[in-house]
Structures are given as structure tokens and as C-alpha cells.
Amino acid sequence: MPCQVLFILQLERKVKRVMEDLTLGLVFTAVFASQGLWALILYLVQRKDKKKDRKAEILDHQSKMLLGLGHDRIICLGKEYIAKGSISEDEYENLNKYLYTPYKALGGNGTAEKIMDEVKKLPIETD
């Protein structure tokens, strides 16, 4: 008789564990199958995409602003040197290497290129 009682108790424990695992599995399935959870996941993904789009837009505007500032400096300095009729080596290096080359690499237009063509024709001042 005591063996049968022990067997029944062990069996009850096993059934209880199986039922707990089954309940946990059902809860897990219900949560992942619910539309609310998927709607939340979709919302979070879309929000992250909007943030990426906004960052890309900001970078685009910053790039355009930098391009505009470079254009302005090339035109202003180039006209100044053309009016002066000459340019020093340092001025030419600063204008060409640090303004015009990056400006051109960013897709700058022909106006600055025309000014630079004129600046390149200027005589180099000797100190």
C-alpha cells in the first residue's frame, strides 16, 4: 500500500509540472499571437525608421549648408585675389586644398570652378 501512495504522489507531481509547463506555453503563445503585441512591435520599428529618416534629412541639410558656406568663401576670397591681381602660395593652398577640393568632392557647381580657374591664372606672390 505505501508504494502505491508514493507512486500516486509522484505521478501527481509530474502531472502538476506538465500542467504548469502547458499553462506557461499557452500564455506564451497567447501573448505572441495577440494583435496588440504585434501592433506594438510594428509601432516601435516604424518609430525607429522615422528617426533614421530624420537623421538622414538633417545630415542632408547640414551637407547642403556646408556646401553653401564653402561656395560663399571660394567666391568671396577668389574675387578678392582676382581684384588684387595676385595670390600668395599660402593663400592659394588654403583656398584650393581646404575649400575648393572638398567643395568639389561634395558636388559643388560651376560658379566656384570659374572663379578657381581665374585664381589659377594669377601670378604667385613671392615673399
Image (cartoon, grey):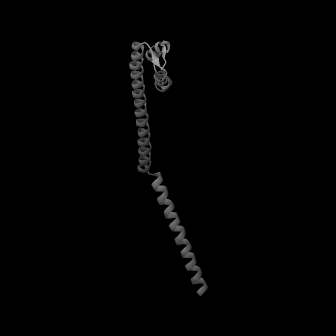
Q: How many labels does the image show?
A: 0
Quarter of the image that includes the N terminus:
bottom right
Any part of residue 86 in sight: yes
Locate residue 72: give its quadrant: top left
Q: Residue at the location (40% across, 18% down)?
A: 75
Residue 50: percent from left, percent from top: 41, 38
The residue nearer to you, when weighing 8 against 52, is 52
Q: Residue at the location (41% across, 50% down)?
A: 36
Residue 124: percent from left, percent from top: 49, 16
Above or below, 16 relative to 92: below
Outermost residue toward the right?
3
Locate residue 69: give its quadrant: top left
The residue nearer to you, when weighing 60 against 13, is 60
Above or below, 4 relative to 26: below
Q: Residue at the location (41% across, 28% down)?
A: 66
Side of 108 where 14 appears, left or right? right
Side of 103 where 1 appears, left or right? right
Any part of residue 1 in sight: no
The residue nearer to you, when weighing 112 against 58, is 112
Q: Residue at the location (49% across, 56% down)?
A: 29
Outermost residue toward the front?
127
Residue 6: percent from left, percent from top: 58, 82
Residue 97: percent from left, percent from top: 50, 25
